[in-house]
Structures are given as structure tokens and as C-alpha cells.
Image: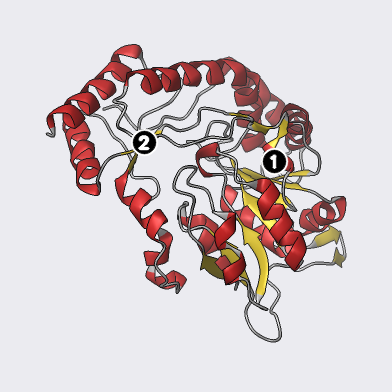
Amino acid sequence: MIPVTKPYLPNREKLKSYIDGIYERQWLTNNGQLVQELTQRLENYLGVENLLLVANGTLALQIAYRALGVNEPVNGKPAQAITTPFTFIATASSLKWGGVQPIFVDIDPQTWCLAPENIDAEITPQTRAIVPVHVFGNACNVEAIGDIAQAHNLSVIYDASHAFGVTYKGESLLKHGDAATLSFHATKLFHTGEGGAIIFKRRENLERAKKMINFGITGPESIEELGINAKMNELQAAMGLCVLDEMEDNLKAREQVWRRYEQALPENLQLQAKHEALDYNYAYFPVVFESEEQAVRVAATLKESGILARRYFYPSLESVEFLDQKDDQPTSHDIAGRILCLPIYAALEKVEQAAVIGVIRSSVDTGR
């Protein structure tokens, strides 16, 4: 079976050396040596400041919302945050979990990111934030979103789970917004098994979040914040350090897979439009078919051939009942129905890539 993705496993002996150090120090969590080292190395690698490691990407979102005060009620009523329906469920469910009502606005039909021109009409006195998503690592229109946020005094928290290492106009895409969050889940380009990070624009938000991820505890007899346990542990950090050591090889291998798909797949499939100033990370290869019926049929044919493709992101989130948002978002609904993400990972062999390409070309050309 060819999976849609496969965790990158770094050199085992290198990982063992980090774990041996953990055994020697007998320090497993609470801002250990490896967490501190990974924090510094990621800031250097990504070209950012104010990076905070956490236990997973969903907690990264939840902590970012709370550190920026997004969850605070407005005039005694729940706050609202404008976001996209074309994303993984955690973007919206983390808002709802924290008492913030997600308000969906539709996406751009080419980039598949939140469309800035749809935002203003949905801003109300309850709106505290905009939560866009750099979908599949593609840059949102950060300038337009920033202008809207400034005009209405709103926070911007980017769900940048897919945007590890992506640069825009020569700088890290993660520098945009009041905060940007990353997921380091096992299936991501960079991972710590489970894990995540928040990059804050302001140091004071970072310092507040540091308290939050450790129950609000600031000393042996001092509790200053309403907190939770969201700390990354040393074993997670060890995996991350090893994966980071091999990042360039990982990226090079993924780019080769991505380029081969781009060149070999039928021209009538729609690919995501990316900004010309974007330096991409080749984390995903999504394609949009001519119809939902075709996409479902191709996915079934691939599965019959031992190949798994995924309908990222399906369903469009305005249709998820517990999110309490019933307004139709036609572009998101349309793209979500017709999209498949194809297998892409560093260890995907050329013969496996050829199998994926062959099934799709045959299915699309013959109408099977």
C-alpha cells in the first residue's frame, strides 16, 4: 500500500545519542535542555523570534487565541473570529472549544486561501480576530488581511500548520500576523512525533504564553495565569532535532516528487495558484478534478491499485453541525468536493510515483 504520507524517520543512531543524553540528565520535561536547543535552532532556521514550543498544533492555536485575548467575551456575549471553512477541523474547533464562535468566509478559487474581499461584510462588534490559514503552505494575501485587521483593531492569528520553512518576499511567512502557529505532527514536513509551535509578533505575548503552557505557574509558590499543560517534552524535542538535521535532504526529495507530478499529470487538473514571491516547501500535492464524481471515482481507482489519496479538506466546515455556521460558502464547498491530495513523502520511490501518475492519467483520459 502506498500511503498519502509517511513520517520522516531520521538517523536512528543520532536519535539514540540524544536519548542517551536524556537518560544521563534524567530531565524529561519542563523546559529541558533539548527543548531549549530546539527552540533556538528553529528560530535560527526559520528566521523568526519569539518561538514557543508546545505539545501539539491544536494546543498551539488554543494558547495563541488566549494569549492574545481572542476568547474574551464582548459586551457579555461570546467573541467571534473570522476564519476559513477550507481547512482542517482543528482551526475552527479550537476556536469553538475556547468559547469563540468561528464565522466562515469564502476562499479564493485559485489560491484556496481565505479571500480578503469577503471579510469586511462579516465583521461585527463581537469580532475579535481573523484566523486565516496558509492552506497547503500557500501564502494568504497577508497585506490585505493586515490592512483589514488594522482598520478594525483585530488580532490576526495565522494557522500556518503547513507553512514550515516557507518564505514570502524573502522572509519567513511566519512573521506575518500577531501570531502564527505550526503543527509538528508525525505526518508534517518537520515533526516531533507530536508537537507544535507558536511564533508571536510581540515579546509580551510570548511571555504570557510561557506561563499558560505550564498551568500558569511562575514559581514554586506562585500561580499568575489561568493555564494548562501544553509543554513539549524532551523526547519530542530529540526527534525534532534529528529531523531538523536532515531537513535539506528531506526537502530535496519531496521537491523531486512534487516536480514529477507537476510535469506528468494531465493538464486539465487544477493546481493551486501560488504567489510568485513564494518559496514553497513541497509539503503537499493537491489536485482539483473537473467534478466531485470524478474525484471520488479516481480516489476509488487509486485505492483499488493500493494507493491512498485523501480528500483534504472535506467536508467544507460550514457544513459541520456543531460549529453552528450554516451560511453557504460556495467556493469552499466546490473545491472541497473536487480535491484530492496525492501521496508525497521523501521515501516515495519513482516506481510508486509512476503508479500514481499512471492511474490518474488513465482514469482522467478514459473517464473510468
Q: Which residue is mark 1?
A: 174
- The amino acid marked with disc number 2 is Gln
Q: Position of residue 351 (x, y in %)?
A: 29, 13
Q: Residues within 10 Å of mark 1 (few under 14, many from 20)?
A: many
The residue at the far front in this view is 117
In this orientation, which residue lies closer to the viewer: 179 or 347?
179
Q: Is residue 315 visible?
A: no
* Residue sitting at x 73%, y 37%: 35
Residue 33 visible in the picture: yes
Depth check, mark 2 against mark 1: the one in front is: 2
Up the image or down, 250 lies above or below 278; here it is above
Residue plotted at (50% across, 31% down) = 283
Q: Is residue 127 above or below residue 109?
A: below
- Give the labeled residue for mark 2: 270
Residue farthest toward the bottom in the current orientation of the protein: 76
Callout 2: SS: loop
Query: Residue sitting at 51 percent across and 57 percent down?
Result: 84
